[in-house]
Amino acid sequence: MTQAGPDMFATALDELAAVVRRIDDDRVDAACAMLADAGKIVVYGCGREALQVKGFAMRLYHLGLPVSVVGDMTTPPLGKGDVFLASSGPGETTTVLTLMRVAHEAGAKVLLLTAEPAGSAAKLADFTLLVPAQTMASDQGVARTSVLPMGSLFEGALFLLFEVMVLKLKLLTGATPEAMRARHTNME
């Protein structure tokens, strides 16, 4: 078994850097504009992608944007003028596909983050933000491109992408660091 060490960190960081360099910044700007202009934002992801999406939702809230997470009891209904942000690295996640259809039927726009631009989810989305990284759909055999297990490269890239989106949204919304901190919970 190979022991973890500085070389593995360097390799993982190089892989993450290669992925985020391939994300189209103009499309990131367009996705941020969609979110900034949304009446309501509802987000969803499965598994470890959900953890990244929920972290992003927290920052959207800190920015003062009207955001909820699917499954929370306080999630409002979506409609015209709203945005459903979903993450499906493999592009075939059944729950994501179903929720995308529900959002469309309600009149909301669907913003998808995926590694599979030809997947079923991308075909349903109004706007797709491609995160070109290994996922659970591409972690076996010759398709494997990362030292990181399963979908970790995609999930790590989501974290970095979301942090940059927060910076861009901060500029778009005029949110100040003081206002963001004032929205941070005191219940911890």
Image (spheres, rainbow, N blue to C red):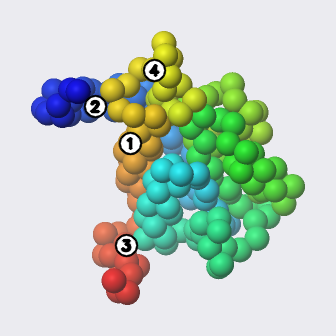
What residue is disc 3 on?
A: 180
Furthest residue to the left?
6
**150 shown above or below 48:** above
Q: Nearer the viewer, mark 1 or mark 3?
A: 1
What residue is disc 1 on?
A: 156
For the residues bearing labels 2 and 3, Cβ distance under 8 angstroms? no
Q: How far across and down, in percent of the image, does residue 116 sit? A: 61, 28
Q: From where the camera sits, is residue 95 visible? A: yes
Furthest residue to the right?
105
Q: How far across and down, in percent of the image, does residue 74 sit? A: 65, 79
Q: CA distance from mark 2 to mark 3?
A: 31 Å
Of marks 2 and 3, which one's residue comes earlier in the chain? Answer: 2
Of marks 1 and 3, which one's residue comes earlier in the chain? Answer: 1
Q: CA distance from mark 4 to mark 2?
A: 14 Å
Q: Residues within 10 Å of mark 4 (few under 14, many from 20)?
A: some
**100 shown above or below 177:** above
Of marks 4 and 1, which one's residue comes earlier in the chain? Answer: 4
Considering depth in this image, is 8 or 132 the residue closer to the camera?
8
Across the whole image, how many numbered discs are drawn on residues? 4
What residue is disc 2 on?
A: 12
Q: Indicate which disc residue 182 carries.
A: none
What residue is disc 4 on?
A: 144
Q: Nearer the viewer, mark 4 or mark 1?
A: 4
For the residues bearing labels 4 and 2, Cβ distance under 8 angstroms? no
Of the residues shown, which amino acid type is indicated by label 3? Met
Which residue does the image show at 51% across and 49% down from the upper left?
49
For the residues bearing labels 4 and 1, Cβ distance under 8 angstroms? no
Q: Nearer the viewer, mark 2 or mark 3?
A: 2
Q: CA distance from mark 4 to mark 1?
A: 16 Å
The secondary structure type at the circle numbered 3 is helix
